Image (spheres, coloured by chain):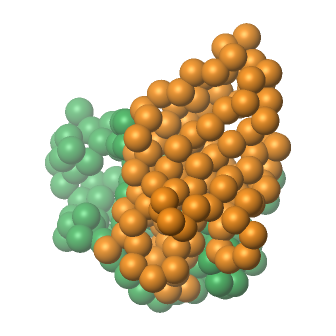
Amino acid sequence: DTGVSQNPRHKITKRGQNVTFRCDPISEHNRLYWYRQTLGQGPEFLTYFQNEAQLEKSRLLSDRFSAERPKGSFSTLEIQRTEQGDSAMYLCASSSGQYNSPLHFGNGTRLTVT
Amino acid sequence: AQSVAQPEDQVNVAEGNPLTVKCTYSVSGNPYLFWYVQYPNRGLQFLLKYITGDNLVKGSYGFEAEFNKSQTSFHLKKPSALVSDSALYFCAVSRGTGANNLFFGTGTRLTVIP
C-alpha cells in the first residue's frame, strides 16, 4: 500500500500527558497537511508543509501543538499537556506540487483524552 | 473568506434511484471545489474536483457534480445509487492560492436503502 500512513490508529491518554502522532505521506508528494476532525464536523485545517518548511498554521493550532517535518518526508504532530477538548480524529494528507491537485488522506489517528 | 454549506445532514435514497447531495459555497475569486467520501473509521477519499472548464465534472465510482456559478452550488449526483455508496460525503473549497488548503463542509450522511 503506497497511500498515506498514520500511526498509531488509536491513542488513549490521560489529561496532561503529551502525545505524538506520525504521518508518512505518499513518497513523491512534497506537500503535507494536518487536519482535525471532531464528531459531526468536517475536517479543520491545522497546518501545512511544503517539503520541510511549515508554511501555514491555523489559529486552531495552539502553542501546545507542534508539528515537524524534519527531512521533508514523514511528519510528527505533538500535543503537549493534553486536554479533553483535544479528543478528535487527527488526519494527515499529502499532495503533489501540482496546482490544486487533490489531497490524499490517511486513515487518521483517533485521540481520546480521559 | 471562504465557506461551504451542506444543507442536509442526512439523505436517504432507495437503491437504484438517482441521488443528489447538495453543496453551496462562498469564496472570493474563482472557486476550486472538491467532493470527498468518508467510510467509517477511515480517512477521506477524493471523488472529483472542479477547477475550470465544463460545468459537469465526472469522478470516481460513477459520481458526477454540476458546478453552477449563478447559484454558487456544486451538487454531487449519481444516476443510480448502490447500497455501497452509503457513507459520509464532504464538499470542500480551496482558496485557490496554490496551497491546496481545503475548507470542508460539515458533511452529509448518505444512506442507500436496499
Could you say which quadrant of the image residue B79 lies in? top right
Which chain is assigned orange?
Answer: B
Rendered view: B21 above or below A96: above
The answer to whether B41 appears left or right of A112 in the picture is: right
Chain seen in green: A
Q: Residue furthest front?
A: B70
- Residue at image coords 68%, 53%: B65
Residue at horizontal 42 percent and vertical 32 percent from the top: B9
Residue B19 visible in the picture: yes
Asked whether B5 or A78 is in front, the reply is B5
Give whichever of B36, B17 is nearer the camera: B17
Q: Is residue A49 visible?
A: no
Rendered position, B38 above or below A93: above
Q: Position of residue A32 (x, y in %)?
A: 55, 73
Figure quadrant of the C terminus of chain B: top right
Could you tell me residue B46's position as x and y percent?
67, 55
Q: Quadrant of the image for the N terminus of chain B?
A: bottom left
Quadrant housing residue A13: top left
Residue A19 placement, left or right of A89: left
For this rendering, which residue is in front, B17 or B98? B17
Which x, y percent locates residue B34? 60, 60
On the image, the x and y values in percent for residue A14 come to 23, 38
- The residue lying furthest to the top in this view is B114
Looking at the image, which is closer to me, A66 or B113? B113
